[in-house]
Image (tube, helix red, strand yellow):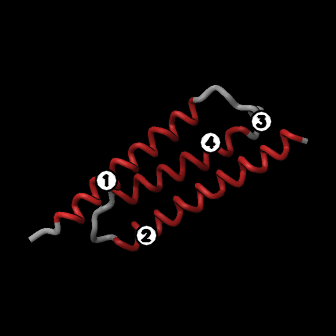
Amino acid sequence: MKNVNSNNNSATAKWLAVAAMVLAIIYIIMPIDFDGPAIGIIDDFFFFMAAFCLCQSCFISSEKKTARRSLRRLSLIFACLGIAWLAVLAIIITI
């Protein structure tokens, strides 16, 4: 007998992962880049990779728990790097 609650959580996680991927793509396409073309793509890369790793972790089979856990950690690392880079850019712009 399958656990219905885990299936609902899995479906919700997949929808959130797809939403994160769509938002990352929108963030990349967004024409507003205050920091210039040379360094403006770094934060786009970090946020896209965070969403990509999150998507990959949600669509991996349940037998590969180690890979899923590693991809989720990698997603968190990319998200933190993106936020840190935005903070650095905010400091650079205000100077």
Q: What's the residue type where badge 3 is placed?
A: Asp
Q: Secondary structure at mark 4?
A: helix
Q: What's the residue type where badge 4 is placed?
A: Asp
Residue 87 vertical position relative to residue 22 in the rendered view, above or below:
below
Q: Which is nearer the N-term, disc 2 or disc 3?
A: 3
Toward the left, the furthest residue is 1
> Is there CB contact under 8 Å for labels 3 and 1?
no
| Location of mark 1 (residue) | 12
Q: Which is nearer the N-term, disc 3 or disc 1?
A: 1
Q: Secondary structure at mark 2?
A: helix
Quadrant of the snapshot with the N terminus:
bottom left
Q: Which is nearer the N-term, disc 4 or disc 2?
A: 4
| Location of mark 3 (residue) | 35
Disc 4 to disc 2, C-alpha distance: 23 Å
Disc 2 to disc 3, C-alpha distance: 34 Å
Toward the top, the furthest residue is 31
User: Could you say which disc has been placed on residue 44 in the image?
Assistant: 4
Residue at 33% from the left image edge and 70% from the top image edge: 64
Q: Nearer the viewer, mark 4 or mark 1?
A: 1
Disc 4 to disc 1, C-alpha distance: 25 Å
